Image (cartoon, rainbow, N blue to C red):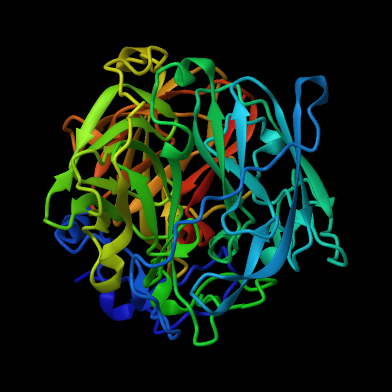
Amino acid sequence: MSEHEDDRPDGVREVARRHFLSIGGALGLVAFTGLTTAHALARRPPRTGAELRSEAPLPPPFQVPLPIPPVLRPAGTAGGVDRYEITQRETTAEILPGVRTPLWTYDGTFPGPTIESRRGRPVTVRHRNELPVPTVVHLHGGRTPAASDGYPTDLVLPGGWPAVRSGHHHMGGMRDPRAVETRLTRDYTFPLDQRPTLLWYHDHRMDFTAPAIWRGLAGLHIVRDDAEDALGLPSGPRELPLMIADRAFGADGTLTYPALDPALRERPGVQEPYLAGVLGDVILVNGAPWPVHEVDAVQYRLRVLNASNARHYELEAVTDDGRRLDLVQVGADQGLLAAPVVHTSLPIAPAERYDLVVDFSRVPVGGRVRIVNRLGSGRTRDVMAFRVARKAKDGGRIPRVLSTDLPSWRRSDAVRVRDLSFRAGRMDGGHGWLIDGKPFDPARTDVTTRLGDVEVWRLVADVHHPVHLHLVGFRVLSRGGRPPLPHDAGLKDTVSLRPGEAAEIITRFDGYRGRYLFHCHNAEHEDMGMMANLQIV
């Protein structure tokens, strides 16, 4: 037990948002006293957060067909730029069979429409905000100029929303002299001068990212190039995007979320039991509960995203007779690996992506392969299933060499090493989610680096913290002083720190100058202060 356990506040105290973040009793043994407690946490079940229980009737698993998000067509292609238009709006959709669920969406679908791009061909996306609150769009994993990166105070205001006074972000009265607001629409420009990979776009509004994503503001963006196309990996209907997300449903089919302000207008935060993270008891894939997909007895490419707010998964592909199929990893967050890595189970934290090939050729026709979550229990142990429908010719292959353009940074290239802690902490008598002991302040610069510099960052955590860097990809150098794990291969933009764990990453800050972010991608942690500014000069 922490030495501060007995003097924790009983509830969420009504003090200004950034001066006092009350985590309270919900965190229990969080490491307020440092890594001693964190090491104890590392022996506890691999879960950070509390689970909501659905009141609506839930369908049996593997009955609802897997939806495939629609691919958005450009509104124009003149001048070598693909131009898209997306309207953010409220709608209702049938997620649970026979029940309508209100959602906040991109273009009326959950997930939002998929954008498919070519490497080096710029894209402009005009977002129109018809929701009742301000929004911000971030292309997660994109090498994006700062003006289009989706900084949390660069709001797109809905019609009728009062303009924020100059130099202020009105949520909590936080000052941000550099905030750039637009009304109704904003054009986001993505040069896409980056390796082919699966990106995703989601809301990034300050203090309210978690509930906005929970309500449906997430979609996929795939970048391709000729070199990847020539590899012969499974493609067409044998390439499946899989956005995994947990949710909970009220008796009337509405999405349950423990927001302090259900309108998401003024008061940020969640009810005290959920301050460590919000977990749902329904696993959705592409917006469907525990879906099933019919496949040929061949290889399939699975583009997997964990879009959950706080839930971690450890995925396995298991036949009905108990055999585990190989998960052949061909790519990570930021694109193809140098060579394939074979897993039998694969951990995936919020915001991580894995590019996998699964071979169904040895599963008999009529057989079933379940994707299960080893970290789940009860209904959350199931994710989805594949039903092998027929024999077919397999045109896909997995080359022994996948990519030769991965960066080869070495420790000796680094101009500096930084130590950064991601922990709950005490301030003004309360508890908060902090980076290096400080909550996020948009007016403060936390890290300054020069364009082109190579740096090593040493990250340390108390509980689970998936740490995401904007703009750049990185390589994992070590975990706990030991070599990285097999799933750390390739170029990443999110690293999953486990309880009590320290990890080293190396990156080169290239691309663009400007103000960017790094933060925990447990969305509740992010909203409650675990975010910091990165200035590239």
Between 386 and 187, the residue placed more toward the observer is 386
User: In the image, residue 306 lies at what x, y percent?
Assistant: 41, 51
> Would residue 67 appear left or right of 47 to someone viewing this image?
right
> Can you tell which quarter of the image residue 180 is in?
top right
Q: Position of residue 342 (x, y in %)?
A: 21, 33
| Residue 475 in sight here | yes
Residue 444 visible (yes or no): no
Quarter of the image with the C terminus in it: top right
Drawn side of residue 83 relative to residue 264, left or right:
right
Whether 410 is drawn above or below 84: the answer is above
Q: Relative to the observer, which residue lies in front, 185 or 31?
A: 185
> Which of the 4 quarters of the picture holds residue 423?
bottom left
Q: Is residue 101 above or below residue 508?
A: below
* Residue shown at 64% from the left, 50% from the top: 152
Q: What's the residue at 79%, 52% (across, down)?
A: 128
Foreground residue, 379 or 452?
379
Q: Is residue 173 left or right of residue 69?
A: right
When the figure is inspected, residue 267 is found, relative to residue 473, above or below; the finding is below
Please state which of residues 442 and 223 is positioned toward the viewer in this rendering. Answer: 223
User: Looking at the rendering, in which quadrant would you find the N terminus?
Assistant: bottom left
Q: Residue furthest right?
A: 160
Query: Is residue 371 placed above or below 352 in the rendered structure?
Result: below
Q: Residue at x 59, y 51 (%)?
A: 202
Q: Residue furthest left?
A: 322
Q: Position of residue 142 (x, y in %)?
A: 57, 33
Where does the image place residue 496, in percent across and percent down from the top left?
33, 45
Q: How many marks?
A: 0
